[in-house]
Image (cartoon, helix red, strand yellow):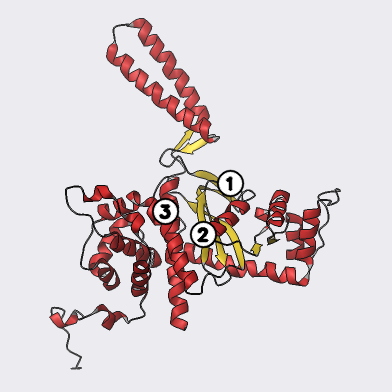
């Protein structure tokens, strides 16, 4: 009979004297702990949390759990609750506490603004460490599905038709039986609900909205439409996210300038160069970047086709290009150095989006509404930056 090493799951010695003895001192959970402890978390302090009742969990602990969860693709509150009890890294960050899924969810809802501000705090930490350099940034966007069914929709035509029927029926009932108070009350409530839905559609400018997430939009993604949001990021040369946001934009033409402004707001300085694909192109964007003294490597669709196929781009149809900003942008991109800079765009920003969507599960948001999804994207971006910092530090 073969002999094996002793095995007894009930042995107390199986529990480590210290987590570092098992995970190693360079484990990601310790990096999350270190960075969060080094940041200013005063924005998380809420006076109402100290008024009676059970004391709230320390926001440092809750934030560490959420960031580590997003870093290892554990993003739902019930899975987090389970992993806090079972996973050594989560147990270390929780410090022996066991917050349940409702508490975890409430923390993210209550502290949305503070979590968003945490992105800036972590970015400052990275820049003090000599990372997230800002000479050149690459900007891109991606579609992320909403937590909503594309089949459960509010359609303008359908609501208008149903509203007319309800009003006619209610008026008829009122004429037939003026003393029928309950029927009048129910009819009025239904009509008011339909009118609110119709007003929401008109204010959105959409013909149809999701019943479960009215903030989501039908967005084109290659050859299909996706019910969701547009998530945008700006990435530094050393592959850190230096700006991020979630929008309802159906195209990227108006996103370039706000993203450059967000980079400047987050980092306190203006980038020297901006790289973006033709989806962000407009003559106005070229003029704006030139006015700010930023070298922008942004091809128009015709030039993008030239850069990809080698066939020289000309005007649009029979029209000759005359805009001086576009002419200068084309000369810059056709030069050897311009082509070299533009080629760097793919290697800078697309791997980051790939990591977020493929490895971190950010193909679909877990929460509904633009404010909640924006916080999810912030947490995913911070967690990515912490993972990147962890990788860079391990190589030193």
Task: Identify residue for label 1.
Answer: 250
Task: Identify residue for label 3.
Answer: 375
Relative to 141, is 367 on the left or the right? Answer: left
Which residue is depicted at the point 65% across and 62% down?
Answer: 274
Which residue is depicted at the point 69% across and 67% down?
Answer: 342
Residue contact between numbered discs 1 and 3, judged by CB atoms under 8 Å: no
Name the mark nearer the viewer: 1 or 3.
3
SS assignment at label 3: helix
* Quarter assignment of residue 91: bottom left
* Quarter assignment of residue 334: bottom right
- First reached walking from the N terminus: tag 2 or tag 3: 2
Label 3 Cα crowd, 10 Å radius (few <14 / some 14-19 / many 20+)? many
SS assignment at label 1: loop
Distance of label 1 from label 2 (alpha carbons): 25 Å
Location of residue 392 with respect to 194 vertically, above or below: below
Name the mark nearer the viewer: 1 or 2.
2
Which residue is depicted at the point 36% across and 66% down?
Answer: 36
């Amino acid at each position: 009979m073969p002999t094996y090493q002793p095995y007894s799951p009930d042995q107390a010695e199986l529990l480590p004297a210290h987590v570092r003895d098992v995970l190693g001192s360079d484990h990601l959970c310790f990096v999350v702990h270190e960075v969060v402890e080094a940041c200013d978390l005063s924005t998380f302090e809420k006076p109402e949390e100290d008024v009676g009742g059970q004391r709230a969990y320390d926001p440092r602990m809750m934030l560490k759990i959420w960031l580590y969860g997003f870093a290892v693709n554990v993003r739902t509150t019930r899975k987090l609750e389970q992993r806090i009890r079972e996973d050594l890294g989560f147990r270390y960050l929780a410090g022996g506490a066991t917050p349940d899924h409702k508490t975890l969810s409430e923390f993210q809802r209550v502290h949305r603004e503070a979590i968003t501000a945490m992105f800036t705090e972590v970015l400052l930490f990275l820049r003090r460490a000599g990372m997230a350099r800002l000479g050149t940034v690459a900007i891109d966007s991606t579609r992320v599905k909403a937590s909503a069914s594309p089949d459960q929709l509010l359609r303008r035509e359908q609501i208008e038709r149903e509203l007319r029927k309800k009003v006619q029926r209610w008026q008829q009932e009122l004429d037939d039986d003026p003393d029928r108070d309950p029927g009048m009350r129910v009819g009025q409530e239904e009509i008011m609900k339909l009118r609110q839905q119709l007003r929401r559609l008109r204010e959105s400018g959409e013909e149809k909205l999701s019943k479960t997430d009215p903030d989501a939009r039908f967005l084109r993604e290659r050859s299909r439409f996706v019910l969701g949001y547009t998530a945008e990021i700006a990435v530094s040369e050393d592959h850190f996210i230096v700006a991020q946001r979630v929008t309802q934009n159906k195209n990227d033409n108006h996103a370039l300038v706000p993203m450059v402004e967000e980079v400047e707001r987050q980092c306190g300085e203006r980038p020297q160069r901006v790289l973006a694909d033709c989806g962000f192109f407009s003559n106005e964007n070229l003029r704006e970047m030139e006015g700010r003294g930023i070298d922008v490597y942004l091809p128009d669709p015709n030039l993008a086709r030239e850069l990809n196929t080698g066939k020289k781009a000309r005007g649009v149809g029979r029209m000759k290009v005359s805009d001086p900003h576009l002419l200068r942008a084309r000369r810059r991109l056709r030069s050897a150095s311009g082509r070299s800079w533009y080629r760097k765009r793919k290697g800078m920003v697309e791997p980051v989006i790939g990591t977020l969507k493929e490895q971190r599960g950010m193909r679909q948001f877990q929460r509904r509404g633009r404010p909640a999804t924006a916080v999810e994207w912030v947490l995913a971006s911070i967690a990515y930056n912490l993972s990147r910092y962890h990788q860079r530090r391990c190589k030193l």
